[in-house]
Amino acid sequence: MVTIESVSKSFGHTRALDEVSLAVAEGEAFGLIGPDGAGKTTLIRILATLLKPDSGRASALGLDVVKDFREIRRQIGYMPGKFSLYQDLTVEENLRLFARLFGTDTRTNLDLVSSIWEHLAPFKKRKAGALSGGMKQKLALCCALIHRPRLLLLDEPSTGVDVVSRKELWDLLATLKVEGITLLVSTPYMDEAARCDRVALIQDGRILKSGAPEAIRQDFPKPLFAIATEERYRTLMALKAWDRTDSVFPFGETLHFTGKWAGDQTTELSQFLAAHHIPATIRLTQPSIEDVFMRLMPAVSANSLSETR
């Protein structure tokens, strides 16, 4: 459904994408996971035919994003990160307008968006600009789906909305996948990776790793420890200075730690903390997608810095 081969894109001296390659299968929910500035929006805009790549090749629906941009635009749905509907039009008027732009009407594909529309229907006469963040998100999704696209591109659709709206969104996306729509979703939230069939971790315009979320997690190379202490900052500084530390960073209410040595790490780690008079609880924990990302990120950042110099 989507093929990207060695795509690069720069804006002035800033390299937004650097030899990116990946593929998305038909009917798949694929996630682009990375922080702000990683290159997610640039990549989605290229697939949406809003930007041209500087080099490399990209296709959507088997069509070239440069040569066949008009046909691609007829067949995809695109929901940008920033709410971009007509704020002076009502909910109903926005939906009707987008249906007409794609040569259809609101009745033809209402079954596809019915689960979303039932939330919007009570506000159909309200102007879009007066909606809450979560309702704007639902309206934008309705408008992107009203022509029943084969491929739906969503650029950080859950950013800026509450936790409940985030969950509702992903529940809605799951129903679209059942309808056979291929999803390509970008997000800065690492926990949303679990809702995708496959993901690509992206930073500094490069793909760090791609694959099924569980396979990526299982590929974490070292035992990972969660350290709970009331003196987190002092503990963090002490562990960073320890020559036996491989990595350590804050993770929620704990610190996540990996050591450089093999064998029983719990005992030596406990002895180190005790020697520094740091009361702490240590437990072995399962790595998350964020742990994998944090492990891969320093190498990319270091390479980028050396290239800049």
Image (tube, rainbow, N blue to C red):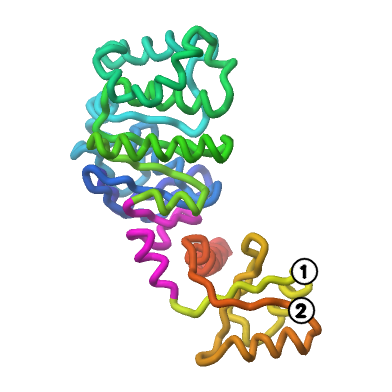
Residue 234, compared with residue 245, is above or below; it is above
Where is residue 113, by image quadrant? top left
Farthest residue, direction left = 62
Instruction: Measure the C-alpha gap from mark 1 to mark 2.
Output: 8 Å
> Is 204 included in the stretch rendered in magenta?
yes
Residue at 32% x, 45% y is 29
Residue at 41% x, 36% y is 154
Residue at 51% x, 90% y is 262
In this picture, residue 104 sits left or right of residue 216: left
Residue 53, compared with residue 123, is above or below; it is below
| Element class at badge 2 | loop
Amino acid type, residue under disc 1 in the picture: Glu
In the picture, which quadrant includes the N terminus?
top left
Packing grade of label 2 (10 A; few <14, some 14-19, many >=20) is some
What is the number of the mark on residue 109? none
Disc 2 designates what residue?
Answer: 279
Q: Mark 1 and 2 residues: CB-CB less than 8 Å, in contact?
A: yes
Percent coordinates x, y for residue 259 in the rendering: 57, 83
In this picture, residue 195 sits left or right of residue 247: left
In this picture, residue 40 sits left or right of residue 150: right
**Residue span colored magenta:** 197-220
In the picture, which quadrant includes the C terminus?
bottom right
Residue at 34% x, 40% y is 174
Percent coordinates x, y for residue 221 in the rendering: 44, 77
> Is 183 included in the stretch rendered in magenta?
no
| Element class at badge 1 | loop
Disc 1 designates what residue?
Answer: 230
Percent coordinates x, y for residue 46 in the rendering: 36, 38
Farthest residue, direction right = 277
Where is residue 59, by image quadrant? top left
Residue 86, compared with residue 67, is above or below; it is above
Counting residues from the start of the chain, the first of labels 1 and 2 encountered is: 1
